[in-house]
Amino acid sequence: MPTDAGIPPNISEITAPLLLGMLWNWALYGVLVVQVYVYSYNFPGDGRVIKLLVYGVFLLETLQTTLSGADLYYWFVSGFGNMERLANPYASPYDTPMIGGIISMTVQFFFSYRIWVLGGRKAAWRLCAAICLLSIMGGAGAFFAGIQGAVRGKFPTGRLLKLENMIWLLGNTLSDLLIATSMVYYLTRQAVNGNLLSDRAITKILRLTIETNTLTTIVGVTALSMVAIFPEKNWFTFPAAILGKLYSNTLLVSLNNRISIRDASESSIRMTSSDDSESTVIDCRMALAK
């Protein structure tokens, strides 16, 4: 039963996921800023496509962080104590599922390209196609969830919550699992063949692959479980709010990992970039760093 002030006794179950999700989102944005600085300082010679990817993702994350700040102001400052404000998603349908869906698809497509290069373009194309299709499935589900939230003007619950968000989160999780499994397989095969990278570099890259994919997968599975088990609650908004930042940080960490294995790796792969229409030397460490 609500109190005399109109605030329900379970108010913390409504506010805590929203507040904690946004605070962790901002914290991860701070980490991303540092990662972008490290990247720009150490790899000014990367190709234009790679730079466009990095700075494009960073701009999207900056926009997302700004919109999430507007959400917090709407819910907890100008709308403090107003339950109607808390039930209204405001800008969150755009900044969490939509922008997050774009970022996750972009990062997963990029790592799918890496698997395509690493595994052999003819041998790995079916696997890469499966990764891309699952990523598109997740992105489509994210956009559907965002559009429905914006149209309804309230947080989804029940069957609608499951339908929209499970497509989004399931697609992302399955794509992450395929990426991690594929990278571990191809990297291990390179180590067995004894070419391209030293054992030390292979070990570092494998460890980073397992760590980053484990983190994104755990968060994705957590959000998916909350949607499936507690469809009447908005608890899933906490892990969902940080998924986009985890993907963007994974991208930057994998690129910046070249610093730590620079001395361990001696080989590089010369590739021709069709986007730049010029010959570009792409370090093998970058092609494998996830």
Image: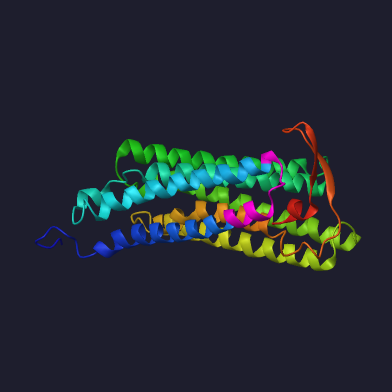
Q: Is residue 199 left or right of residue 166?
A: right
For residue 209, above or below residue 102: below
Q: Residue at x 75, y 59 (%)?
A: 184
Placement of the N terminus among the 4 image quadrants: bottom left
- Picture mark count: 0
| Res 231 quadrant in image | bottom left
Q: Position of residue 222 (x, y in %)?
A: 49, 61
Q: Position of residue 154 (x, y in %)?
A: 30, 44
Residue 157 visible at all:
no
Q: Quadrant of the C terminus?
A: bottom right
Q: Position of residue 204 (x, y in %)?
A: 74, 66
**Any part of residue 280 in sight:** yes
Q: Is residue 37 magenta?
A: yes
In the image, which residues are magenta?
36-49
Q: What secondary structure is the stretch in magenta mostly built from?
A: helix
Q: Quadrant of residue 135?
A: top right
Color theme of the render: rainbow
In the picture shown, does residue 149 fall above or below 251?
above
Outermost left residue: 4
In this view, the residue in front, 160 or 136, is: 136
- 1 in the magenta segment: no
Residue 256 point in image, percent of width and height: 66, 57
Q: Nearer the viewer, residue 153 or 2?
A: 153
Identify the residue at horizontal 53%, vertical 47% (top origin): 58
